[in-house]
Amino acid sequence: MSTPSETRAGRKPSGRGKAALAIDWWPGSLPEGTTITPHTVIAHDGEVSRATLYRCGQSTSAVCLMHPRQDMQRHPLIPELLRAGHAVWAQASRVVGNDLTLVHESLLLDVAGGMEVLREAGYAHVTLVGISGGAGLYSYYAEQSLIPAADRVSRTPAGAPTPLPDAELPAPDALALIAPHPGQGRLLLAMIDASVADEADPLSIVPELDPYDPANGFGEAPEGSSFTPEFLDRYRAAQRARVQRIDDHARELIEAQRGARRRWKDGSGDVADRRHSILTPVIAMYRSDADPRCTDLRLDASDRPYGSVISPRPSISNYGVGGFGRLTTADAWLSTWSGISSNAAVSRCLERVSVPTLVVEYTGDCSVFPSDVAAALEAAASDDVTHERIRADHFGRRLHEDDDPPIPATARVLASWTEEHAR
């Protein structure tokens, strides 16, 4: 770990251009006197991630923000948490901005590296705050850090060995989950389009499973869809079957590569085996914006509007370039985006997380639904679990212009809860 430089935030500058972005945050500036220290974190396996430590005053409590693939170093909660008296550790993982090779078991080592920095710096109380997809990452880390080393995950879902049983994984003192996806794999399991007939043909359709066909109950806004229980049962089963097919394909790709590697190493292979042992194929997965709950608002009812977290018109965006899990290696698919194989599932992990746990539900979330939150709460093993509800969309924005700003409200809930448990 290195700390190459340290800066100090002062009063808000008069300009509003790019130069002001370093300290001018929405919904407000960093508190005067905030110290900003960049860190380079070297994980147990030698890989590098980066983080920023924000401090204002002498706090012994640190709040950590991290997401598997998004950079949390400018998250709008940071100024509010600093005002509440907490230091904030905001970390970007080794694969930030690109989930092509995102293996959650490796990212746990990034989290551990950050935890070591904070413990060495003297922070006596550390709270992991998993926001959105960060919930699966931090729940998984909390679970692995709190169980005996011999019981930790020793192989990824792809079968590759992990150093988790031998690594130092400092345990957190508390875990907070905000707008928590059930885990990126389980999120995608609910969103993947079950009507794809052929993975090699992005336009292929099984008509009786098409969630965007009016004959199956689909409707555009404002009326929305009206799906029958029979259709939903068939659709959910077909979603799982599609994920299983991609899992099977991923494992076939992995075994083919390992077979070529074995032959090359034992001398029985040829040049083609050598090349195959190096080549890492990429899985292209199409149409992943098709959760029926996004167009049928009667299902898992909440304050949410019509549409998905990706688009207000998922019938269009489902065929677009965006979406979750679109391009991954076979290892990354199994570890991150498979709702069947991934270990980073919130409800699975919380069954062995004993530290105090806070779950903040955004009531207008188009991506995290009431049943997801209920499953997390039911699974939580801690005897100290708090559930708070705030009117907001998935990104912490107002549902209506008359609503109170959700980010300050979230920060107040989080800061109050953390302060209570840090005593």
Image (cartoon, rainbow, N blue to C red):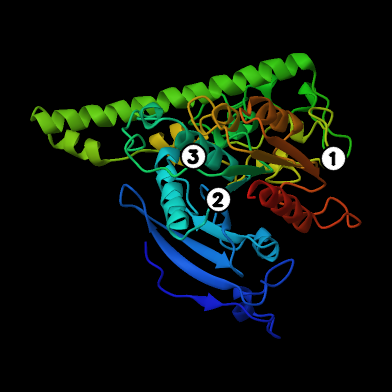
Q: Residues within 10 Å of mark 3 (few under 14, many from 20)?
A: many
Q: Which residue is mark 3?
A: 141
- What secondary structure is marked by label 1? loop
Residue occupying the point 37% across, 26% down: 251
Left/right of residue 229 with respect to residue 336 in the rendered view: right
Labelled disc at residue 420: none
For the residues labelled 2 and 1, say whether their Cβ atoms are less than 8 Å apart: no
Q: Residue furthest front?
A: 423
Q: Is residue 282 left or right of residue 67?
A: left
Q: Position of residue 234 (x, y in %)?
A: 67, 16
Secondary structure of residue under mark 3: helix
Q: Earlier in the sequence, mark 2 or mark 1?
A: 2
- Name the kind of residue labelled 3 in the image: Tyr
Task: Relative to 280, say whether 122 is above or below.
Answer: below
**Quarter of the rendering occupied by the N terminus:** bottom left
Residue farthest left in this picture: 267
Which residue sits at x=62%, y=45%? 320
Can you give x and y, in whole percent of width and height, for residue 107 in the image?
A: 43, 45
Q: Nearer the viewer, mark 2 or mark 1?
A: 2
Q: Which residue is mark 1?
A: 303
Residue at x-position 83% and y-position 35%: 302
Are circles 1 and 3 on residues that touch, CB within 8 Å? no
- Residue sitting nearer the eye, 339 or 408: 408
Residue, disc 2: 126
- Relative placement, left or right, of 195 versus 92 is right
Give the CA separation, mark 1 to mark 3. 31 Å
Q: Nearer the viewer, mark 3 or mark 2?
A: 2
Label 1 vs label 3, nearer the camera = 3
Q: Residues within 10 Å of mark 1 (few under 14, many from 20)?
A: some
Question: Looking at the picture, how far across and down is residue 2, in whole percent?
Answer: 37, 66
Q: Earlier in the sequence, mark 3 or mark 2?
A: 2
Q: Position of residue 11 (x, y in %)?
A: 68, 81
